[in-house]
Every structure is written in C-alpha cells, then in structure tokens.
Image: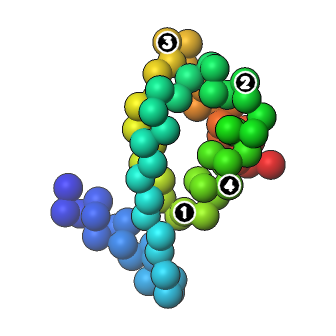
Amino acid sequence: MKLIALLFSLCFINVEAFRICSFNIQSFGESKIAKTEVMNVIVKVISRCDLMLLMEIKDNTNQVINKLMAKLNR
C-alpha cells in the first residue's frame, strides 16, 4: 500500500496544486441523471477536482457512472 501511495505521489511532483474532493450527491441515480440542470451542476463541481470521491451512488444497472463519465469527458 505504501508503494502505491509513493508511486501515485511521484506522478504529481511538478504539480503545484492538487485538488482532492469528496461529494455526497445524495441518492445519485437515474432520476438525477435525467435532470439536465442537476447534471450540469454535478459536472461543473466534479470538473474542478483532480481526484474525486463520490458518495451515495444508487444504481443497479451500473449505467449512471458511465453517463456521468461521458459528460465529463466532453
């Protein structure tokens, strides 16, 4: 585990600021993905961070994260 942390930190030696964020979306699922305004805010918040931890993702089909990633990668 220490080796992984060391290798991860070496990737960012030349970086002056590294932003790590966590965001509790509160029941993030198909209903929130369907709302354009909500998705735009979520994408805006997430795109400000270098490393993001999302909490309360509720998705039985594993499609919500794929849709979110598609919007982030545009």
Q: Mark 4 or mark 2, which has the lower sequence index?
A: 2
**Disc number at residue 34?**
2
Q: Mark 3 or mark 2, which has the lower sequence index?
A: 2
Q: Amino acid at mark 1?
A: Cys
Q: For this view, does 13 lie left or right of residue 37? A: left
Q: Position of residue 31 (x, y in %)?
A: 63, 20
Residue assigned mark 4: 44
Q: Residue at x 40, y 38 (%)?
A: 55
Q: Residues within 10 Å of mark 1 (few under 14, many from 20)?
A: some
Could you give the CA–CA distance between mark 1 and mark 3, rounded to whole angstroms?
26 Å
Residue assigned mark 1: 49
Instruction: Kindly state the secondary structure of the residue where label 1 is placed.
Output: loop
Q: Nearer the viewer, mark 3 or mark 2?
A: 2
Could you give the CA–CA distance between mark 4 and mark 2, rounded to whole angstroms?
16 Å
Pointers 4 and 3 in contact (C-beta within 8 Å): no
Q: Judge whether 15 appears above or below 71 on screen.
A: below
Q: For this view, does 30 lie left or right of residue 58? A: right
Q: Position of residue 61 (x, y in %)?
A: 55, 13
Q: Position of residue 47 (x, y in %)?
A: 64, 58
Q: Amino acid at mark 3?
A: Asn
Q: Amino acid at mark 4?
A: Lys
Could you give the CA–CA distance between mark 3 and mark 2, rounded to whole angstroms?
16 Å
